[in-house]
Amino acid sequence: MKNLCQIAQKINIGPERVHFGEPMKNHTSFRIGGPADLFVEPGSLAELEAALGVLRAEEVPFFVLGGGANILVGDRGIRDAVLSLGGLTQLSRRSGGIWAEAGIPIDLLCENCLAFGLSGLENFYGMPGSLGGALYMNARCYEMDISGIAEEILALSPEGEIRSFAFSPDAWSYKHSPFQPGGRLEGWIVAGALFRLEEKDGPGIAAVMRARKKDRISKGHYRWPSAGSMFKNDRRFGKPTGAILDSLGLRGFRIGDAAVSPIHANIFVNLGSAKASDMKALIEYAAEKAFSAYGFRLEPEVCFVGMF
Ligand SMILES: Cc1cc2nc3c(=O)[nH]c(=O)nc-3n(C[C@H](O)[C@H](O)[C@H](O)COP(=O)(O)OP(=O)(O)OC[C@H]3O[C@@H](n4cnc5c(N)ncnc54)[C@H](O)[C@@H]3O)c2cc1C
């Protein structure tokens, strides 16, 4: 194993931004996950480029962390490094929209849009996670894909080259982005994005934001730690995944403290001290039941990270 202390020294972005054995449960919405050997959180784009340069030169594999709202990290944690984008939160008003760095929480981005009187992102208010993670996942809320309003994306290549891409719709589809495995930007890091937004009156924007958050509260989204929807919807199945899991009587079913939410069958929750192994077993059990009953494979939306 590489000497991670020496590597951390080379990264040289201040001790408060580099940690060893960092518990990942403190960085995931599931509140699950063992330690990351090396946890690096650059505070600026320049620091991100510097950290990436060292990790590359030292051949240390790394996982890019946004808000941790769509990942299940194994109980044995993450060997090598986690590169957290949580320190990149700058944003500015631009003509026709807003520019923001990848680590900004979606809620904070929406609140800034409201302050500027800019409309377009309010459907995403209440969705946990960061801008970078939302673009990677091509997050979708209330029938709207986040890519639909992206105008330009700034990204870092695996070799450290920084490039700006005009948004091109052909590479994006339901919960799919070119940054995911197999995509033409696989391995690139989203550093920031420009969203094309419309000037509107503040109270109108605020009303939609309030309604979205209220709806999520009523659906129990924040009742227990979770990662949102566990499986993707698939039109070929003829009904939403939640209805499929409901028809199998899975609502409330649990393995240890990992449970299918009693409120919504496609949200899997941590009732207190769930292990990643319990959650993984629950996911596999639900997928297997759906396959036996209906003959189709549910595709997890949540990303599995590290060692289980
Ligand atoms: C209560 C709740 C409700 C939710 N509701 C919705 C919903 O309505 N719609 C929806 O689509 N999702 C929903 N989610 C899931 C989650 O909020 C989104 O998928 C969100 O976009 C994840 O962003 P993140 O920053 O947390 O990503 P993370 O979980 O940190 O990472 C997810 C993936 O993105 C990659 N990634 C993260 N940042 C970057 C970056 N800057 N560059 C490259 N790759 C990156 C990671 O490596 C990982 O593979 C919900 C989750 C919760 C907990």
Image: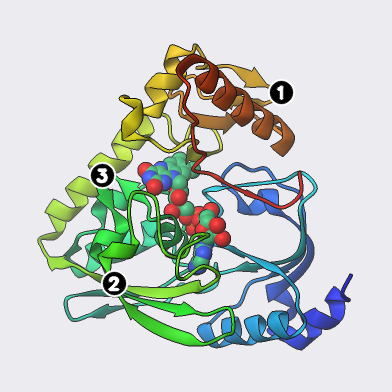
The answer to whether residue 67 is visible is no
Reading the image, the residue beneath label 2 is 167
Tell us which disc is closer to us: 3 or 1: 1
Q: Residue at x 71, y 23 (%)?
A: 256
Per the image, label 3 sits on a secondary structure element best described as: helix
Q: Residue 25 placed where, x, y %?
A: 68, 48
Please name the residue that numbered disc 1 is placed on: 256
Instruction: Name the quarter where the N terminus is drawn.
Output: bottom right
Left or right of 76? Residue 125 is: left
Whether residue 49 sits left or right of residue 206 in the image: it is right
Labelled pair 2, 3 in contact (Cβ < 8 Å):
no
Q: What's the CA distance linking mark 2 and mark 1? A: 44 Å
Rendering coords of residue 238 (x, y %): 30, 25
C-alpha gap between disc 2 and disc 3: 29 Å
Q: Nearer the viewer, mark 2 or mark 3?
A: 2
Residue found 55% across the figure and 88% down from its top: 46
Q: Is mark 1 within 8 Å of ligand 1?
A: no
Q: Residue furthest front?
A: 295
Q: Residues within 10 Å of mark 3 (few under 14, many from 20)?
A: some
